Image (cartoon, rainbow, N blue to C red):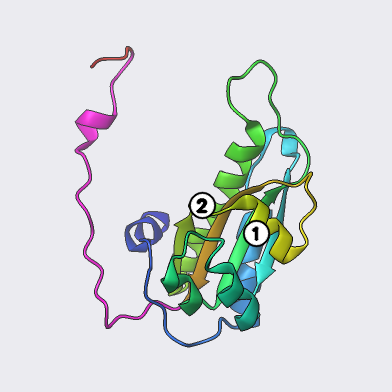
């Protein structure tokens, strides 16, 4: 069942003019809440944006990507505290937030909703628009809504498993 959601999920850039029901939105947010995090710190705060005027005002901050206006919801994921980082060379909070939002994308796909990861944004502008404190950097933004099927999805190629996985030792 999970593999089905993974296979369904793709970056949606065309959305129907249809709001996401409260119960469905609650379910996708619950998927984020249940996501694992290092030492269970859950170092995130999700700002859920549904107001049409606010979403329109955010288009410029999100790299001018016009399709963002079509999304029923934007989920702005911010750091809220530090992640678990003992001796690692990565930011545990960023990893944890990414896991939480991936849970959101898969839950959304399983419910017939679509998402798109938005990494091209001006964090300062987004923070100003949403009154996000400077101590809570924006990590990623996720568009959410009902996919417009009149724009068919054509999946891109994926590398074969043997190019992505090696056994016991790293090989070229």
Magenta region, residue range? 146-168
Q: Residue furthest bottom?
A: 17
Name the residue rendered at 61%, 39% in the picture: 94
Q: Going by the image, does 55 lie left or right of 8?
A: right
Q: Give above or below for 129 relative to 32.
A: below
Q: Give above or below for 17 relative to 91.
A: below
Closest to the observer: 126 or 19?
126
**Disc 1 crowd, CA 10 A, few/some/many (<14, 14-19, 20+):** many
Q: Where is residue 156 drawn, in percent x and y?
A: 22, 54
Q: Give above or below for 86 relative to 131.
A: above
Under circle 1, the secondary element is: helix
Name the residue rendered at 63%, 51% in the picture: 123
Closest to the observer: 10 or 71?
71
Q: Which residue is mark 1?
A: 126
Name the residue rendered at 22%, 45% in the picture: 158
Closest to the observer: 1 or 57?
57
Q: Which residue is mark 2?
A: 102
**Disc 2 crowd, CA 10 A, few/some/many (<14, 14-19, 20+):** some
Position of the C terminus, as image quadrant, is: top left
């Amino acid at each position: 069942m999970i593999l089905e959601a993974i296979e369904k999920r793709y970056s949606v850039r065309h959305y129907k003019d249809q709001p996401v029901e409260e119960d469905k939105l609650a379910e996708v947010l619950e998927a984020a809440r249940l996501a694992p995090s290092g030492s269970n710190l859950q170092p995130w705060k999700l700002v859920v944006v549904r107001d049409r005027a606010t979403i329109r005002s955010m288009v410029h901050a999100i790299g001018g990507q016009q399709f963002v206006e079509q999304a029923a919801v934007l989920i702005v994921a911010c750091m809220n505290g530090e992640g678990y980082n003992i001796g690692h060379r990565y930011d545990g909070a960023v990893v944890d937030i990414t896991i939480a939002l991936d849970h959101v994308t898969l839950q959304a796909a399983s419910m017939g909703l679509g998402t798109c990861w938005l990494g091209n944004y001006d964090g300062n502008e987004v923070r100003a628009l949403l009154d996000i404190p400077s101590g809570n950097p924006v990590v990623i933004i996720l568009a959410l809504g009902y996919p417009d099927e009149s724009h068919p999805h054509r999946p891109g190629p994926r590398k074969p498993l043997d190019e992505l996985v090696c056994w016991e030792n790293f090989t070229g």
